[in-house]
Amino acid sequence: MKILVCISKTPDTTAKIAFTEGNTKFDENGVQWIINPFDEWYALVKAIELKEKDPSAIIHLVTVGTADAEPIIRKALALGGDEAIRINSNSNDSFYVAKQIATIAKEGSYDIIFTGKETIDYNSASIGSMLSAILDLPLVSLANQLDLNGNTATVRREIEGGEETCEVNLPVVISCQKGMAEQRIPNMRGIMAARSKPLKVLEPIEASATTSIKKFDIPVAKSGVKLVDPANMDELVRLLKEEAKVI
Amino acid sequence: MVLVYIDQADQQIKKSSLEAMSYGAALAKQLGCDVAALVLGTVQDNLAELGKSGAQKVYHLKNETLNSLDVKLHSTLIANAAKNVNATVVVFANNINGKAIAPAVSVKLEAGLVTGASSLPNTENGFVVTKTVFSGKAFASIQIETPIKVIAINQNSFGVVAYDTSATVEELNIPIPTASIKITKLEKVEGEIPLTEASLVVSGGRGLKGPENWGILLDLAKSLGAATACSRPVSDTDWRPHHEHVGQTGIQIAPNLYIAIGISGAIQHLAGVNRSKTIVVINKDPEAPFFKAADYGVVGDAFEVVPALTSAILKMKSTA
């Protein structure tokens, strides 16, 4: 079995969000970079769990990013995975990124392609779905549980107002969220092993971007909290009804 | 033509789809073109009524197998329909189904995609759509460079507009490809309001001290007709189910009212709720960072404040 895990580099969840160059570029100054939590905690760890059950499984990691993404890939390799592929390009366009990953996916004939449910920076939640369309594969989105039985995956996923379980034949694209696996911390052996794992760097294929970011804006801050006396909840109800008009 | 995909849960058209319909109608007016809805599956609603949310025409592919989400199947049918009607923009609600299907449709139509759109595009010079990024901590204005565009509009960001018209319904008779997944089990959360669709949300954090104390929160939610949510530590320790976790690594919501009880307001939590119209924070710690993001704050013991708030709401409702 071959598994491909898509990894994205994102700012740390506590990073200050600011922009430079006339609000056209994310200000990377002082930003700590992490593996996108959904990719790391759920997609990658699930792949590792599958390999623990079936040691013959092969896990490849793929990221689209410039050389500064390498510490993130090494950290992912320290958690698990056999080798990594970095496509040497930087793009905010989901279609361009999906095209690059799809090329790797086609060549590697993977049985399962895992993505996180979305990245915490651009929140587009689109790579998994785009990959499924480019590769003409089924997609199970928002998966929170997966069991394999031969060539069939039984996957539980979130739907509006509940959950459902479905069966799907491999190969398949699966976007992962909470519940799929438990977050792990790399151990020393993993960190040492990661240093010698192969990290291939490939140049991107030609693909045109379909979108471009013109500018960023920071939302207007709240004007300040209005404190209400804890002994006077009638006043809070009045404010919510008459001032905020939300109840 | 602007084509709006109308999705469903339990054979009911969702509020977020009606918002998408009104968004599509406003966009069609802006572009000076027609607007139509596309409905897949069997729904109990009267489809002509979609006219009241802005549809001029409704295309309906009535087939039970389309009632549950199969991205491969749905995206193929939607992309084909969009080609057949020469759609230049395809609009989705940015809900669970829309988020999953829209990117696949964009690939099939070679269209640029913006998910999580927060307002109508600026079409004065090109086609620029504003979307939320960094989990609601910022907005990005995105230019779509392709002739065909796909947009998924955030829930609760474009209100349903009432139109005084009825839409004409055309039943489509096209063959359905084989399903790519098979649903084997359905677990509906009974009697609860889906969090992403809710306009009122009551949420609890570690300040409530344990799952046995959730009764006061549930009573408050019931008095308001609100959905319930929780912070990450609460779902991580299984005090509450995972699907209630709102925040950067849970789900992001944008209700009209978000009441946070015993939640300190870590930046990761705020990222999931900062698009709420009105935020009420109840916390005994006056230094809790959440107060900075709140509209109304109550510094006090949740175990006293919350039942008092519930009583005040019930009193207001009984006299209203």
Image: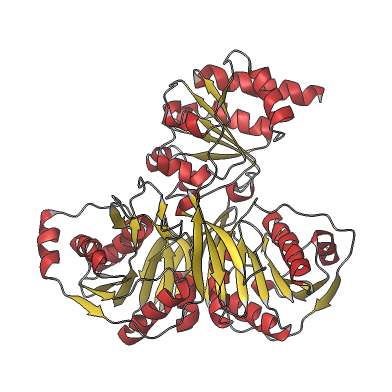
**Which residue is at 26% across, 75% downward?**
A85
Q: Quadrant of residue B55?
A: bottom right
Q: Position of residue B86 (x, y in %)?
A: 71, 83
**Front in this rendered view, residue B211 or A8:** A8
Q: Nearer the viewer, residue A60 or B296?
A: B296
Of B150 and B129, the residue lying toward us: B129
Image location of residue B264, percent across then percent down: 43, 31
Q: Is residue B274 above or below residue A140?
A: above
Residue B47: quadrant of the picture: bottom right
Residue A166 can be seen, yes or no? no
Q: Is residue B57 left or right of residue B313?
A: right
B11 to the left or right of A194 = right
Which is more toward the observer, B190 or A200?
A200
Question: Seen from this angle, which residue lies furthest top?
Answer: A231
Locate the C terminus of chain B by quadrant: top right
- Percent of width and height locating residue B204: 49, 33
Judge from the rendering whether residue A28 lies leftward or rightward of residue B8; answer left or right.
Answer: left
Residue B81 in view, yes or no: yes
Eyeballing the image, is B27 above or below A134? above
Q: Residue at x 76, y 74 (%)?
A: B60
**Quarter the N terminus of chain B occupies:** bottom right
Who's the residue at 25% across and 61% down the image?
A: A72
Q: Is residue B50 left or right of residue B128?
A: right
